[in-house]
Image (cartoon, helix red, strand yellow):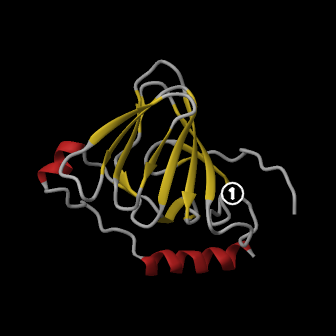
Amino acid sequence: MNRIFHMTNPIIVPDGTIVNGFMNALDNTSNLEFDLLDSLSIAGGILAPHALSKIQILPLVTQNTFVLRGHLTVKMKDAHENTHYTLNLAFQQAALTKPGTFLQLINDTDETCELLYIITPSYVFELRDDKVQYDDSVVFDENWEMIESRGWQSPKPYNTPTEREAAIVRLKHKLQ
């Protein structure tokens, strides 16, 4: 089936940024058929001038963050590294974030940054009555120094494959 997909339903996600999962069948805010696509998802993102996301980890998925407009600073800490590092991305550049990597997106410019998130396997996001039931991202309120002072131990439990599968089953029943 050929069709055109539109970014029409942006929401503020738990990390504080604006995301539109316009090609994500495992996101019940996207209005797509459940079985349309399960191997990857694509979402648009907006980061306002001088805005930053909360620090997060994607325990079970890999994210490619691609800059469509503006500039983006990406702060990450890989699971096998002892400290965090920074990547500065410009127009048409991308950063790859593997599972278990601490991640923060920072727009320290006067211009809005527009992003494309390509995630594999497909990102699971379940919202019910304006409350997040499941999110493939684990978002923290702590800053880098606080997390580092705990020896890079997550202040929250990671999502498990079992929890992810349970969310997918619930979404399947709701979206079909």
Q: Position of residue 130 (x, y in %)?
A: 56, 58
Q: How many marks?
A: 1
What residue is at 41 percent from the left and 59 percent from the top? Answer: 58
Q: Quadrant of residue 127?
A: bottom right
Q: Quadrant of residue 98?
A: bottom left
| Helix, strand or loop for disc 1 | loop
Q: Is residue 5 left or right of residue 131?
A: right
In this view, 88 is above or below 149: above
Q: Is the N terminus in the top left, top right, bottom left or bottom right quadrant?
A: bottom right
What residue is at 13 percent from the left and 56 percent from the top? Answer: 150
Q: Amino acid at mark 1?
A: Ser
Q: Nearer the viewer, residue 17 or 118?
A: 118
> Badge 1: few (under 14), some or many (20 or more) residues near its Cα, within 10 Å?
many
What residue is at 25 percent from the left and 61 percent from the top? Answer: 154
Q: Is residue 48 left or right of residue 4?
A: left
Q: Position of residue 144 (x, y in %)?
A: 23, 44
Q: Position of residue 123 (x, y in %)?
A: 55, 62
Q: Quadrant of residue 124?
A: bottom right
According to the image, label 1 marks what residue?
30
Q: Is the C terminus in the top left, top right, bottom left or bottom right quadrant?
A: bottom right
What residue is at 34 percent from the left and 68 percent from the top? Answer: 158
Q: Position of residue 37 (x, y in %)?
A: 70, 66
Q: Nearer the viewer, residue 102 or 154?
A: 102
